[in-house]
Image: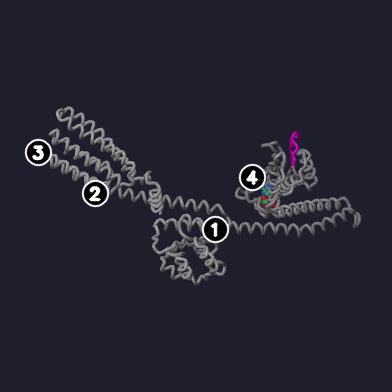
Amino acid sequence: MSELVLRTALRDRGGRAAAAPPPLAAPDAELRARIYFGLWIALLATAGFAAGDALFAPDALWLLYPVKALYLLALALAFRALPHARDAREVTRVALVAIALSFLVSTVSAIISRDPLTTPVLASAVTVAGAALVPWTVRAQCAVVALAALAVVATALAGDGGGALLAYPTIVVAACFGLSIYLSHLLGRYRAVAADAERRLRAEAQVSAALARVGRELIASLDAGELLDRLAQLTVEVFRCNASQTWMRDGDGVFRVAAGVSDDPEELTALHALHLPEAAVGALVERLRREGPVTLTPDEVAALPTAALSRRHAVGHVLFLPLRKGEEVVGVHTVVFRGRERALDPTVAHLAAGVAQLSSLALETARLVEAMNAADRLKTEFLANLSHELRTPLNVIIGYNEMLLDGGCGPLNDDQLGVLGRAQHNARELLALMGAALELSRHEGRGVPLVLEPVSVALLVDDLAREVAALPPLAGVTFAPAVPPDLPPLLTDALKLRMILKNLIDNARKYTERGRIGLSAAAADGGVRFAVSDTGYGIPADDLTRIFEPFRQVGGGRTPSGVGLGLFLVRRLAEALGGRVEVESRLGEGSTFTVWLPLRSTPR
Ligand code: ADP
């Protein structure tokens, strides 16, 4: 897949801009860099040879130097031509021409200066070093060896040392030539293996990058419909296919297109109208369950229930991916390529397996979140109904109590009045709690309305302390409110703050058998932190976060009383006031609930 894209890019660029050569692939660029290096060596060697000429053949300089000047010109031309070479072949061609010229110059110089050894030595050095340094093919190396051999033979035939060259040096030169070809053969094999490994690594990296993108985009949505739309769109982009559809199985086992993208809108409309019963696609679904993603050839596609449609819209290969829920296949995602000629890249299989897993996972998560939201809505509705239903009889009870307290049914003694008073007080508390629950559920998802007013913390705590003192005393438990008088007033909803603290004190009273219940307030973090502490049963560490959920009651040492709404309300109310609630607790030692509120609450 990557090579296809790269080749297309090269073709496009090459077609548009003939003057500026396209960038070379990495191995070709390396070859060019090494040839540059070789040209620089040749340049320096020429200077060395020129100095040698001056020393050993001063009489022939008038002939030797023009030859070398011509050679320098040729090297300059090679330097100019190299950046324009478009691939390894053209780079090699420039190098071979430069080498041929080197040998020619060396041969001519050797003949002029009557020096038969320079050319064979140069030929040996160039062939062995060239094979080791220049990463080109065996064929190119054979061409270098042939050029070198020609140069050596020409020098031997034309020079005086022909006889000598047929003996020992000839064997050395031939050995160097053979060695250089063997070396380039070895290097060629090693390079082929390395190039293959690199190609595979690059393909893997591309697959990983594509999967990371699919994963990132899929988890960005928790809505199943939106997620399937994204999946189809992503599939077309990542696989570079012509179309993609997701078939989901409904409760009756019928497969329908839930989302799709196509370069042919008519095809998509027709597919949306199709309903495939499980029996019609059972074999394919079973294969997907067993094997994971499968590719069907055009002939296999023609055997599916969608065959007529596929023929009409020139569908070729199709890749089918299973969307799973556990072991079960709940949907089928397709990657559609048109035309028969397309052969699928092997990396596509990797990509397909990854996409199938990621989309199954994302779909399952979306489904779970949907179920959770539905349960949450149901709970809220239930809460609203419950508090509404309870308020009516509670109001009746409060009414009768009122009548009794007012002496409407005859005079009552002090004890009776006391008991009735406490019953009336608790009934009103319960009514307030129900009212708050109803109000919260009504405003679920929206802001809770606030009635803001300046509240003196010291007065509020005094008031609460008096109220607690009026409650039936708990044997062995003392209540110790402690608030510094200089706390700044809060701009907040007094009723809601009262309800928060009252609930926490009530809980402390419910879950403490002996010791002390404390209520304190202190300035902290630009607001006020209230703390209700007790030396009661404590709460198990695992339950500390759960106790704030509605209807959540935990053991913690004794049977809970109440309905499990108190802390839920506390948290919601504290958040509505712009604050937060935290709890610290040790089983058997007690708990401390802290409520932090800002100095000024703002309606949300
Ligand atoms: P409930 O109506 O059961 O009191 P809450 O929402 O007020 O409901 O409290 C939830 C649970 O948290 C209670 O069932 C209780 O187990 C635990 N809990 C709350 N406050 C305390 C406390 N001060 N000490 C120990 N456990 C507590």
Q: Earlier in the sequence, mark 1 or mark 4?
A: 1
Going from N to C along the chain, the mark reached first, 2 or 4, is 2
Q: Point out the tag, 4 or 3, that comes first from the N-terminus.
A: 3
> How is the model colour-coded?
one colour
Whether residue 330 can be seen here: no
- What is the CA distance from the residue labelled 2 to the residue labelled 3? 30 Å
User: Where is residue 522, by image quadrant?
Assistant: top right
* Mark 4 lies within 8 Å of ligand 1 (Cβ measured): yes
Q: Which secondary structure, mark 4? A: strand
Q: Amino acid at mark 1?
A: Asp
Question: Which region of the structure is painted magenta?
Answer: 478-491
Which label sits on residue 585? 4
Residue 339 falls left or right of residue 267: left
Q: Amino acid at mark 4?
A: Ser
Instruction: Determine which residue is flagged by label 2.
Output: 139
Residue identifier under label 1: 229
x and y percentages locating residue 71 in the rendered image: 23, 36
Query: Quick check: 82 left or right of 156?
Result: right
Report the mark closest to the observer, 2 or 1: 2
Q: Is residue 385 magenta?
A: no
- Residue type marked 3: Ala
Q: Earlier in the sequence, mark 2 or mark 1?
A: 2
Residue 386 in the figure: left or right of residue 141:
right
Q: In the image, what residue occupies the spot 78% across and 57% down? A: 391
Q: Which residue is mark 3?
A: 164
**Residue under the image location 22 percent in, 44 percent down:** 144
